[in-house]
Amino acid sequence: MQALRHLEPTADLRTTYQYQNLMYMTAGYLAGQLTDSSWEDLLRKRILEPLGMSATSTSVAELKSCAVGARPHESRTGKVREVPYRSLDAVAPAGAINSSVNDMVRWMRLHLGGGRFEAKRLISSKSLRDMYRPHMSMGQDENAEIQLLSYGLGWTVMSYRGHRVITHSGGIDGFRCRTTMLPDEGAGTVVLSNSDTALPHTLTWEILDTLLGLKSVAWSRRAKSESRREQVAQREARRRQLAGRTSGTKPSHRLDAYKGTYHHPGYGELEVRYEKRKLVARLNDLDGRLKHFHYDTFEFHGRRWPTPLLLSFTTGADGGIPQLALPLQEGVADIVFTRVVTEG
């Protein structure tokens, strides 16, 4: 939280819809502080225990110890493979809850019951109205079936083919999910997947069409088309990146001269190491190899982005390498990391 002040905004406050995990982290931290507790304990006492959500946890460590815990998978170059769990402990309120379909049904029953669960009130009617009330327009969805798209408090609010829908999706490395409710019909769906797939979204809309007795829409075909468009866009982005490359250049220093720790007050530390006559980098918990692009710019190949990022080193007047820059946020200038000078 202390580092947030060092991150440059890309829009003025309350002018544009921007989903931000770090703001959920902050809200969770404040909720714990205001109750002389923690987000995890507050969630457990106020929500999980009263609802009997015994299969729900708030950390990867707890999920790993579960004998029936799902394993995350991702698709790369047409092949599906298992990937490591990603710990979100530091930003837990933004997406560290691990649950099951049965437990999530209990969570939906609370909302569909107007804040009551088995005759006991857990959320006030006023709070629910505030959650479901549009607070920020999200613009026009590309699907004509989805209208009046907006964001409430922790929920996406929309009109789906003329029916009021409250929904939210989520995803981390190897997992995707969507929880959706039709409050006026008293129905809801939850779809969980241990893969980076559009299935939770596609299946949700298909189920809603069936529940509402509506003519079916080719959601699966649309999802496949969208996936192909994304792949084409990624290839085009890579093509443009390579088109801007100057051939025949080489680094201005020996490769081992670039190694060191570089720091940014908002993004933390980026470590560059020289191993087996090659450069590798580690940004917090993300490892990747560095491949020379041109001059003092290298491609940073990380698993979490489809196109490598161009990492550029700066040479000072004394011939040293005081900084590097990396494009980590669209809408702002490249993030500059300053080399940490060690004594001795």
Image (cartoon, rainbow, N blue to C red):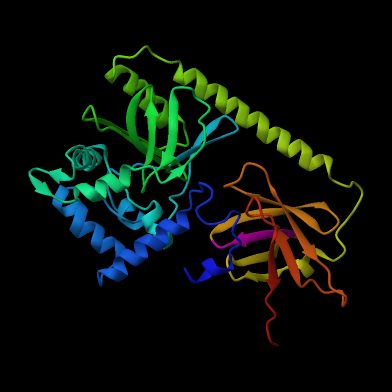
Residue extending farthest bottom? 344
Q: Residue at x 35, y 66 (%)?
A: 30
Identify which residue, 281 or 38, lies in the foreground.
38
Quarter of the image for the C terminus: give it. Answer: bottom right
Residue extending farthest right? 248
Is residue 292 shown left or right of residue 308? right
Is residue 94 shown left or right of residue 118? right
Q: Where is residue 118 in the image (x, y as percent from the top left)?
A: 9, 43
Q: Where is residue 264 in the image (x, y as percent from the top left)?
A: 63, 69
Does any portion of residue 136 appear in the rendered image? Answer: yes
Is residue 120 shown left or right of residue 17? left
Residue 22's place in the image compared with 189, above or below, is below
Is residue 279 within the magenta segment? yes
Q: Where is residue 307 in the image (x, y as percent from the top left)?
A: 67, 43
Image quadrant of residue 227?
top right
Does any portion of residue 88 appear in the rendered image? Answer: no
Q: What stretch is highlighted in magenta?
A: 278-284
Helix, strand or loop for the magenta stretch, by majority: strand
Q: How many marks?
A: 0
Residue extending farthest top? 215
Identify which residue, 255 or 118, lies in the foreground.
118
Is residue 324 shown left or right of residue 84? right
Is residue 8 within the magenta segment? no
Identify which residue, 232 or 138, lies in the foreground.
138
Q: Position of residue 250 (x, y in %)?
A: 88, 56
Residue 259's place in the image compared with 120, above or below, is below
Q: Which residue is drawn at 64% across and 71% down?
A: 263
Q: Residue at x 57, y 47 (%)?
A: 304
